[in-house]
Image (tube, helix red, strand yellow):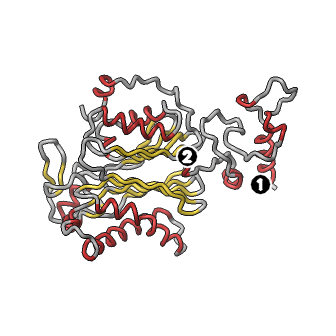
Amino acid sequence: MASKSLLNILRYYSSSYIRPKSYNKNVNSTRPVSSQTSPRNEPENFDTLGTWDNRIDLPLLLQASIKHGRPIPKISVDNVGTASVIGRRESNEDRFRVKELLPELLYFAVFDGHGGPECADFCSAHMEEFILHWLLRGEKDLESILQYSFQEINNAYARHTTFNCPRKDASTAGTTATVCLLRNSVELVIGHVGDSRALLCRNGETKKLTTDHSGETKSEKERISKSGGTIRVDSLGRHLVNGRLAMTRSLGDLDLKPYGVTAQPDTRSLEVKHGKDAFLILTTDGVNFAMNDQEVCDAVNICHDPVEGANFVTDQALQFGSEDNSTAVIVPFGAWGKYQNHKKIALNFGRSLLRSNRY
């Protein structure tokens, strides 16, 4: 009975709430024009409930809204914004993927290749196959699925370099991986290795969802040392494993796996709060090197849609001195547009250059 009551309330408000954008002064009614003509033809959406005036028309998931007792919008891959620029490199070794794996499960990922594009190409092409394999086997825990998938795709790449890869030294190629699964528009699960990042804009502030795997971290350094590897600091201040790799976890880099460079990801799960969360953004280190996390969040918040946001962030990184490939994937949530004027920032070159991570 409680579920039916909530369903009736949702339907009532979605059809009768006064929405200022569509109100017609020439009609003597308090209902929107669209509701007068065919009140049941339009899908219920997050905006018609009157929560706020967001700038992306997100349809409402009725069953999920009933289950959670609050409006839950349906997140679609069609609303995701992506951009990748080559920067000042000879080639772009960044890769990204956005896909609907199942009707209730979305997949987002960024891969930042190094030492050649082979590993990033292989992982971006096949990671979703391993995830689907475990889903079809009946595994429900998404964190466990990502743990299994990262290890298996690393082993698969080792076989690929041995039997199928035309370049003989492709075993030294590797990639970061930041992979996100979104189930029923609410459950967000993240697995990552390397220094690509996942950031969440909540209440207009940046919530960092990943931790860079660097030799500066005590636990990471200890694991490398116990495995017989060494951490050396170069002239740029980077902590390099065996003087070569600027991260302590990655996919590929098969020659460094005996020295503690693991493919085991860090994973975490959280609930998306659509009343507070504006977007998720995945970035490679070409962006993170030039812009701090809050700068990235603020830059996206002044943009009209995720596509514009992704292009703006990657362009800003290039202008602020990044020489690396820069990639951004932006997934809008229910509060998209809510924090447009949360912070008035001046994204001029000089001010942002001084505040960026590089200086």
Q: Residue at x 51, y 65 (%)?
A: 141
* Circle 1 residues within 10 Å: few <14, some 14–19, many ≥20: few
Q: Residue at x 50, y 40 (%)?
A: 306
Q: Amino acid at mark 1?
A: Ser
Q: In terms of depth relative to the viewer, which is nearer, 66 or 42? A: 42
- Name the residue tied to disc 1: 3
Tell me if label 2 and label 1 are in contact, CB under 8 Å. Answer: no
> Based on the displayed image, in which of its 4 quarters is residue 248 positioned?
bottom left
- Upstream in the sequence, badge 2 or badge 1? 1
Q: Is residue 33 above or below residue 122?
A: above
Q: Position of residue 51 (x, y in %)?
A: 67, 36
Residue at the extreme right of the image, as rendered = 28
The dot on residue 172 is none
The dot on residue 79 is 2
Left or right, 92 with respect to 232, comes to right
Q: Residue at x 83, y 24 (%)?
A: 26
Q: Amino acid at mark 2?
A: Asn
Q: Residue at x 40, y 66 (%)?
A: 126
* Circle 2 residues within 10 Å: few <14, some 14–19, many ≥20: some
Give the quadrant of the N terminus.
Answer: bottom right
> What count of labels does the image hold?
2
Q: Nearer the viewer, mark 2 or mark 1?
A: 2
